[in-house]
Image (spheres, rainbow, N blue to C red):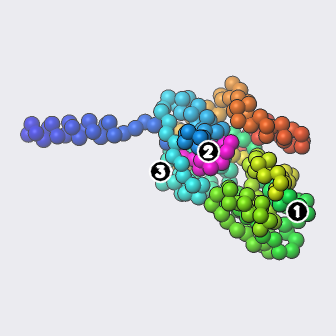
Amino acid sequence: MIRCFLALIALGVVTSCSRSDALIIGTDATYPPFEYKNEQGEFAGVSIDLGKALAEHLGRPVKFENIAFDGLLAAIPTGSVDIAISSMTATDERRQKFDFSDPYATTSICLLVPKGSALASADDLKQGKRRVVVKIATTGEQWCLANLPNAEIVALDADPACVMEVSKGSADAWVYDQISVMNYAKANPDTTKALLAPIRVEHWAIALRQGQDELKGKINAFLKEYRSQGGFEKLADKHLGTYREMLKQQGIPFIFDVPAAP
């Protein structure tokens, strides 16, 4: 009896110790300056700082899990992560599988094209037989599949692979978000150029499992407080100053300057 009792106590201690109150945040850390690994192999970027601030607000330690974007979409409804902060657009299709917080940013998708391209807008992709690259499971892929029935859509799993196709002239365009397109055009000025005119306005939000109304309410309260206290302005100063200026020069609203829409 004593042995059994001690065993049960030991089991209870082990079980208690094995549980963690950490907020597990999933992110695809291949997307600078929003979510990536720095030279020291540490998580860094806008989404990482936002996640740390959220965890502090909730009074919980934080743990980040690096998951490829298509895998991340599958991980959220299964509970493999508590939430996902990964520059994710809140779409009706995704809402069928999991839930979203209030939006914290407004952006749009646009085009990265070869340097000498004659393309002037996304409408030009609808003319003739085009080859367009997209990143798997992104809204850029969704838009292309819905709007470019005559194009060859090539889905790749990483940003550098998409950029390479455009740089080589093997693809007519890559459909992706504005700031990333600016980033890659700046890094490859001899082979690419950015067409920043918005194709479709999108809202980024924090993803979580359906039915977590209490957690969702706490996240929304945090986002409202974080914005009112200048948190997003500080994120922009730290990570996005160059991009904010480039957008301003072209008369395009900055993602944190636009009021979040439901």
Residue 8 is covered by the magenta coloring: no
Residue located beneath label 2 in the image: 36
Residue 7, placed above or below residue 177: above
Q: What separation in Å lies between label 3 and label 2 (alpha carbons)?
A: 20 Å
Whether residue 101 is visible here, answered yes or no, is: no
- Give the residue at x 70% y 31%: 238
- Which quarter of the rendered picture does the N terminus lie within? top left
In the shown orientation, is residue 229 left or right of residue 242?
left
Whether residue 27 is in magenta: the answer is yes
| x then y, percent, for residue 30 | 62, 49
Rendered residue at 77%/68% (across/down): 170
Q: Which mark is residue 163?
A: none
Residue 156 showing in the rendered view: yes
Q: Which residue is mark 1?
A: 117
Q: Which amino acid type corresponds to the residue marked 1 in the rendered image?
A: Ser
Segment tinted magenta in the rendering: 25-36
Q: Position of residue 220 (x, y in %)?
A: 62, 36
Identify the amino acid type marked 2: Tyr
**Furthest residue to the left?**
1
The residue most toward the front is 190
Front-lying residue, 23 or 158: 158
Query: Residue at 83% across / 60% down in the picture?
Result: 114
Amino acid tagged 3: Ser
Q: Nearer the viewer, mark 1 or mark 3?
A: 1
